[in-house]
Amino acid sequence: MADDIKITKEETAKGGRYVTVVSGHEAEMTFSRVNPELIIVDHTGVPDALRGQGVGQALALHAVDDARAGGWKIIPLCPFMRAQSLRHKDWADVVRQS
């Protein structure tokens, strides 16, 4: 299912979020922009109805892919994003552990 998840990015000068709606339920990953080269992922919210379907993982991977494409780094303050980044050593090129 994770491959079918359409994620959009909403961004302001100070931050933004990655968001998806699956089966009528909205899930999001929010971030703050420290500077043009650094964001802090501070929250991941996935409704109970979507848990275990790879939605949070899809949001995290989208953030990593976006960071690679944009040339910035991620500080994973959100517990979910931090746990994912520790599991995915291949994200080390864009994830900075605090």
Image: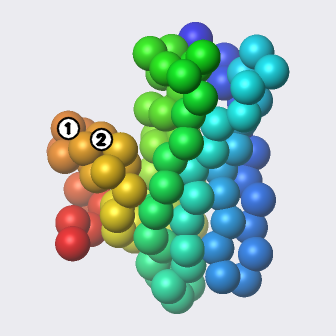
Q: Which mark is residue 1?
A: none
Is 46 or 11 nearer to us in this picture? 46
Which type of secondary structure does the marked residue at label 1 adopt?
helix
Query: In the depicted view, which residue is nearer to us: 24 or 34?
Result: 24
**Circle 1 sits on which residue?**
87
Quarter of the image with the N terminus is top right
Packing grade of label 2 (10 A; few <14, some 14-19, many >=20) is some
Q: Is residue 94 left or right of residue 3?
A: left
Q: Amino acid at mark 2?
A: Gln
The residue positioned 64% from the left and 73% from the top of the image is: 15
Mark 2: which secondary structure? helix
In which quadrant will I find the C terminus?
Answer: bottom left
Type of amino acid under label 1: Arg
What residue is shown at x 25% (from left), y 44% (from top)? 83
Using the rendered view, name the quadrant where residue 4 is placed.
top right
Q: Position of residue 56 (x, y in %)?
A: 49, 33
Q: Furthest residue to the front?
A: 48
Quadrant of residue 24 within the rendered picture = top right
Marks 1 and 2: CB-CB under 8 Å?
A: yes
Task: Give the residue at x 70% y 44%.
Answer: 19
- Image point 67% across, 66% down: which residue? 16
- Residue topped by disc 2: 84
In percent of width and height, residue 3 lies at 58, 19
Percent x, y for residue 42?
A: 46, 63
| Vertical order, 42 against 45 (above or below) | below
Query: On screen, 48 above or below 77?
Result: above
